[in-house]
Image: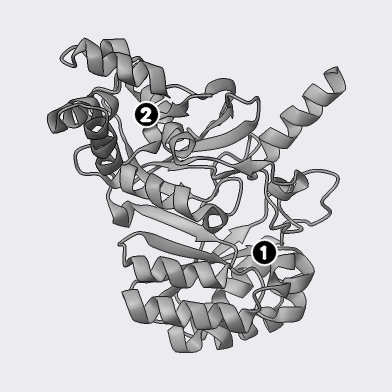
Amino acid sequence: MKKSIYGLTQEQLTEWLIEHGQKRFRAEQVWDWLYRKRVTEFSHMKNVNKECLQLLEENFVIQTLKQAVKQESADGTIKFLFEMQDGNLIETVLMSFPYGLSVCVTTQVGCNIGCSFCASGLLRKNRDLDSGEIVEQIMKVQQHLDEKGKDERVSHIVVMGIGEPFDNYTNLMDFLHVVNDAKGLAIGARHITVSTSGLAHKMRQFADEELQVNLALSLHAPNDELRTQIMKINKAFSIEKLMDALDYYLEKNNRRVTIEYILLKDVNDHQEEALQLAKLLHDKRHLTYVNLIPYNPVNEHIQYERSDKKDILAFYDTLKKQGIQCGIRHENGTDIDAACGQLRSKQIKKNTKAV
């Protein structure tokens, strides 16, 4: 299969075209057609010569994703299920906030991290997405907005969909450079957040990039025994290793990191855990923010329940009293398959039954 042209950064596209006998300015023209005019066929690039167009047609494709399902929530959230060229399915979510339109992208087909509360982990990792397939999720959503004719644009990105972004590091980095490019989509680095379940060595590598991109760490438990129980990755990267990597990141970048904490009823939502979390983050409290997340029940195979509202508020109050910056995440798309990976797993189950 031909590769997606979205997988090339502007520098890589320029180098490729020059190597194939084209002038440097051709790359600028092609880039403009892709990201400013957002064409979906090479033949629509009107000021690009035939030789260059033929070269692109022979080696690349623009569209590799096909919309399989689209769910729209009453709050404006839209969840897309895309089918890729090899038949695999991925999810992408468009969310509306007062500050703009945010898209949550997927980086892998399935996930090997195996968090016990997550629908993404119900189906093992099949493969990594290449950078073009990640970029195209943004382009598909932007094209959806263009078709509405309201002059709306994707302004924020969260890399929190199916998969572990740092387990697909090279493609992730190319994706970030493409969407951040000032001559393309021009989505500001500070408007992009990458979430990790805690690959400590990759957190250090990401720190060395010295980007302005935001980092979120999915912690979900304040001690090793509990975290290992709900996140098997903790066996490889203990909380001590994570905190060391987090210290390295904060020292290198001096940028606030979000600590993601899903509240599971009678599992990690007690006052004991709140106090342990506050102690764990005490020396980092000025550069961390705890995002408390009410749990979205997934299906009958995952038995966790959402914490009671009073317990969520009590957890929040305890953190605040201990000087920890925190908030309770606003929920989007609760009337559709809101949990990450939920729509994909349902669709695969449905297709399997049909066969």
Asked where in the image residue 353 lies, by quadrant, the reply is top right
In the rendered image, residue 49, in percent from the top left (x then y), is placed at 18, 14
Percent across and percent down for residue 133 are 48, 34
Which residue carries the number 1 mark?
Answer: 263
Comparing 354 with 145, the one in front is: 354
Is 24 drawn above or below residue 233 in the view shown?
Answer: above
Which is nearer the eye, 106 or 71? 106
Residue at screen point 19% across, 16% down: 48
Tell me residue 110's x, y (percent). Answer: 67, 44
- Residue with the mark numbered 2: 142
Q: Nearer the viewer, mark 1 or mark 2?
A: 2
Horizontally, residue 321 falls left or right of residue 315, namely left
Q: Report how far apart the C-alphas of labels 1 and 2 lie in the structure.
A: 33 Å
- Which quadrant of the figure contains the C terminus? top right
Task: Count every numbered label the image shows and give the total.
Answer: 2
Mark 1: secondary structure: strand
- Label 2 sits on what residue type? Gln
